[in-house]
């Protein structure tokens, strides 16, 4: 349970960093909605990302893994798309803001996972 809560918080903080750093990604809502967005992002990543990685595997190999950022950008776009009907307030204005946001989310998430010792909690 501690792993799940920490993972959602890391997702929320990573997306918040992308919102602050990338023009074209906006959030209009209360702070607690960012936590829900982190949970939605985790669900999207756990359900859809493995399927997308299988279908795009040849492109990932061909680009030496760089295409993974495109898949991550799509996951962020899907999260923003789900944010609308759920009234969470996350909006992304196109692919390129999503691409740069995905890069920031990946870096911040990796750093926070390392700093918090997330792998030690899981095992």
Image: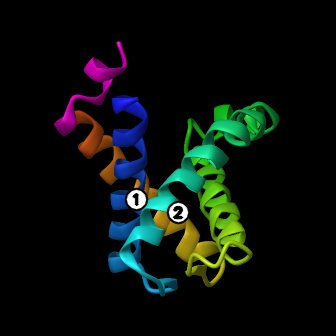
Q: Regarding mark 2 in the picture, which secondary structure is present there?
A: helix
Residue under the point 22% across and 29% down:
117
Q: Which mark is residue 12?
A: 1
Query: Which percent across, then down, holds residue 24?
Result: 51, 85
Q: Regarding mark 1 in the picture, which secondary structure is present there?
A: helix
Residue with the most extreme top position: 123
Residue with the most extreme left position: 115
- Residue 104 visible in image: no
Residue under the point 64% across and 71% down:
83
Query: Which percent across, then down, holds residue 58?
Result: 76, 33
Q: Which mark is residue 37?
A: 2
Name the image quarter holding residue 6.
top left
Question: How many numbered circles does the render carry?
Answer: 2
Contact check, label 2 and label 1, Cβ < 8 Å = yes
Query: Which percent across, then down, holds residue 106?
Result: 42, 50
Q: Which residues are magenta?
A: 115-123
How far apart are labels 2 and 1 at the CA level? 7 Å
Q: Which is nearer the eye, 52 or 115?
A: 115
Horizontally, residue 115 falls left or right of residue 30, namely left
């Amino acid at each position: 349970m501690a792993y799940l809560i920490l993972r959602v918080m890391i997702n929320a903080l990573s997306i918040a960093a992308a919102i602050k750093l990338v023009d074209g990604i906006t959030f209009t809502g209360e702070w607690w909605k960012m936590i829900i967005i982190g949970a939605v992002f985790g669900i999207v990543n756990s359900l859809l990302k493995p399927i997308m990685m299988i279908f795009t595997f040849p492109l990932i190999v061909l680009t030496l893994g760089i295409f993974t950022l495109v898949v991550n950008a799509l996951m962020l776009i899907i999260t923003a798309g789900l944010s609308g009907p759920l009234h969470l307030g996350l909006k992304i204005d196109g692919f390129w803001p999503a691409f740069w946001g995905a890069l920031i989310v990946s870096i911040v998430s990796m750093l926070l996972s390392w700093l918090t010792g997330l792998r030690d909690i899981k095992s």
